[in-house]
Amino acid sequence: MIRRGREKAEVKRGRRGGVLSDIVRDRQLYMMLVPVVAFYILFMYIPMHGLQIAFRDFDIIGGTAASPWVGFDNFRWFFNHPHFFRVLSNTLLLSVYNILWGFPIPIILAILLNEVRVKRLRNTIQTCVLIPHFIAVVIVVGIVLRMLSPGSGVVNSIIMAFGGESIYFMTEPGWFRTVFITMTNWQGAGFASIIYLAAIAGIDQQLYEAAVIDGANKWKQTLHVTLPGIMPTIIILFIMRMGAILEVGFEPVLLLQRPITFSTSDVISTFIFREGLQQGQFSRATAVGFFNSFVGLMLVISANYISKKLTETALW
């Protein structure tokens, strides 16, 4: 018994020594993690202390400690708000449309770029589709507004050239979702395709050679080799996308919307902006944001559970 205890103690010391020696050996790599860890601690975890504002009647002068506890009153206010169903339905519709159109486009773009064999042409196309991602949202919205201008916009000029009438896109609620989805996909599809290009590059080339020997054309190679090879990446990104289903881009929505289009453009993020910053209702705005995050967490857990059961691919 004494010998076994000594052996266990020596094993533990060896493990500790091994871990410490690994940290000392790889200290430069661990130092690179410090800014990332500090960022998440300072801007993600410490601010969680402020979530209690959602359960208080926040007093900006007295601070959190002096604010009375009101329980779930702020959440009841949001659920009973006359615009609750409007902002919730608009957010869900924009997110669902964005997933239906925006999620497959980067995959298709990555597959098409992978099939371009001329390196200079492929690099040129990839650069062109990546550039919009690095343009500020304000500039992108300005370009869109200019193109959709009823008087001198390119789109309306083409419509009128074919005998149609000028359309006031930005003042008609029915056009907001189409404009928003088109703009966001144009700006983000190129950057999102990089992950899928990396996943395609990791597929074993012997699989393609075997498919060619079996007589598979390009379509069958894509269907039976490329897509199964990147399917784990697609599933992981889809699960993460589900967590942000209520987080429609705040800046493009705010810049594109007009009071006349609130019936289709008012979403949770713009509702929080009005209540929190414009009207100073910090407790109510925090409660809405807490609800948004909670729903996202539940969706991620559910999507991860279903994916693990059906495909054995999951985040955890």
Image: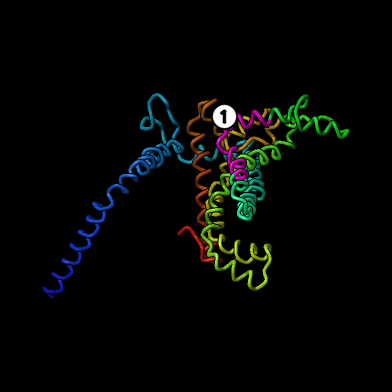
Task: Please state the horizontal and vertical placement of residue 241, each as a whole percent of the image.
Answer: 55, 50
Q: Nearer the viewer, residue 305 or 9?
A: 9
For image coordinates 63% across by 66% down, the residue present is: 224
Task: Considering the whole magenta stretch, tell me its main secondary structure.
Answer: helix
Q: Name the one closer to the observer, 121 or 51.
A: 121
Work out whether residue 107 can be spotted.
no
Quarter of the view holding residue 212: bottom right
- In x, y percent, where is residue 39? 38, 40
The magenta segment? 124-144
Taking 207 as reference, is 134 above or below it?
A: above
In this view, the residue in front, 73 or 299, is 299
Considering only vertical position in the picture, is 238 above or below 76?
below
Q: Which residue is mark 1?
A: 274
- For the C terminus, the image quarter is bottom left
Residue 128 lies in the magenta stretch: yes
Q: Is residue 159 visible?
A: yes
Quarter-of-image position of residue 125: top right
Residue 121 covered by magenta stretch: no
